[in-house]
Image: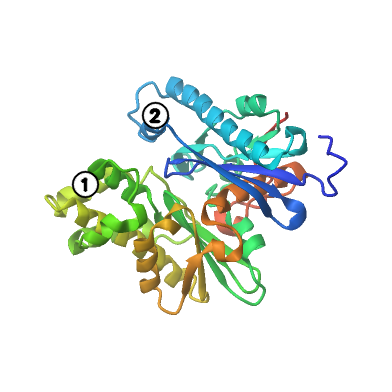
Amino acid sequence: MTQPTTSPLPHRYCIGLMSGTSLDGVDGVLVDFSRGSQVLWHASRGFDAPLRAELLALNRPEGGDELHRAALAANGLARCYAEVVRELLKATGMEPSRIAAIGAHGQTVRHRPQMFDGTGYTLQLNSPALLAELCGIAVVADLRSRDVAAGGQGAPLVPAFHQGVFGQPGKTVLVLNIGGIANLSVLADDGGVLGFDCGPGNALMDGWCQAHTGQPYDDAGRWAATGKVWPALLDRLLAEPFLREPPPKSTGRDLFHAEWLAGHLAACAAGTAPADVQATLTEFTARACADAVQRFGRAGSELLVCGGGAFNAHLMQRIAALLPGVAVDTTATRGLPPLQVEAAAFAWLARQALLGLPGNLPAVTGARGPRILGAIYPA
């Protein structure tokens, strides 16, 4: 691709788009890589109710004519992505020709690496060809499947970016992303990186809140703070085998979904007040995250939190209380607001693909080696 003569660095500007397992919408950032990884602008767009319902339904294997529904939902997702791109360009005064690529993660609807046939699969709903047509910008998509093909988990992919942005020589830094699922990056003082999904993030809390209050999420965790933790239910949730598995590991709504929770409720908590269930789910998320830190990040004295969960004050308080001696704060203290981190990571992954450089960390995903990730759809 011909680069603008005003850009001293190849592929200087990239856009990253992220729609995570919380299913709340799209976060987008425009990143200038000539200044490290400086986010020039952040934009977001919520999913409208029909698209969110369709994306959520596609997370269930009994969704009906999934191929037809998935294809049309992917087009709807691409149009939502394009709106965010247009907002980013308008706000920064950028022409599409100045953007090297859009890193479009897509919407994960199945994540089953290493299962069934030994390789498994990961499936992100997306229509990158349509997105390239709508925006006039190259799109890098399908960023996880090459790692899965190489024997890896395909997730998490953000620890390499975390290391570049938040890593500090001689100090172990911990980065906790709390989206629909929570993942932890351990950025060791010697430059080594460990990363893995540590359990549910917002997915269970948001689903329960939506079902019982009509609100898409528990604002600042205020509702959970009114309830009491139900010990029997918490013990059952914490007994989930995934939490005890060693990394590399990843998960999603394939495991932590409403039916999974309903089974535990039926076994020990039928009739429990909804606020108490919310309090217990919040404690479950906090415990799963804190346990991961205690098992694999003991050398860290600083925990930087990003993702939507960083705005759940009650959850943040519980994580801090469970990790005495660890300074818990958001990534905003290091110059990158919580809702911008993952999108910036996918802008970085897009640039890696254009440069022909690996985007995965085999030590994190378990892949057989470094791989260039993603398929490129030219403008």
Return the residue nearer the eye: 263 or 175.
Answer: 175
Return the residue nearer the eye: 230 or 246.
Answer: 230
Residue 167 in view? yes
Asked if residue 63 lies left or right of residue 76, the reply is: left
Q: Amino acid at mark 1?
A: Gly
In the rendered image, the quadrant that contains the N terminus is: top right
> Which residue is denoted by mark 2 in the rendering?
54
Residue that appears at 66% across and 24% down: 133
Crowd band around label 2 with a 10 angstrom C-alpha radius: few (<14), some (14–19), many (20+): some
Residue that appears at 52% across and 56% down: 338
Q: Reply above or below: 77 against 304.
A: above
Q: Reply above or below: 317 against 103.
A: below
Mark toward the viewer: 1 or 2: 2
Q: Earlier in the sequence, mark 1 or mark 2?
A: 2
Residue that appears at 53% across and 52% down: 156
Point out which mark residue 178 bears: none
Residue extending furthest toward the left: 271
User: x, y (%) of residue 90?
Assistant: 66, 36
Q: Which corner quadrant of the image does residue 86 belong to?
A: top right
Residue 281 in view? no
Q: Which corner quadrant of the image does residue 192 belong to?
A: bottom right
Mark 2 element type: helix
Residue at mark 1 to residue at mark 2: CA–CA distance: 24 Å
In the rendered image, the quadrant that contains the C terminus is: top right
Residue extending furthest toward the right: 5
User: x, y (%) of residue 58?
Assistant: 40, 31
Residue that appears at 53% across and 60% down: 195
User: x, y (%) of residue 311?
Assistant: 43, 57
> Which residue is denoted by mark 1 in the rendering?
263
Asked if residue 34 lies left or right of residue 113, the reply is: right
Return the residue nearer the eye: 155 or 118.
Answer: 155
User: x, y (%) of residue 69?
Assistant: 43, 22
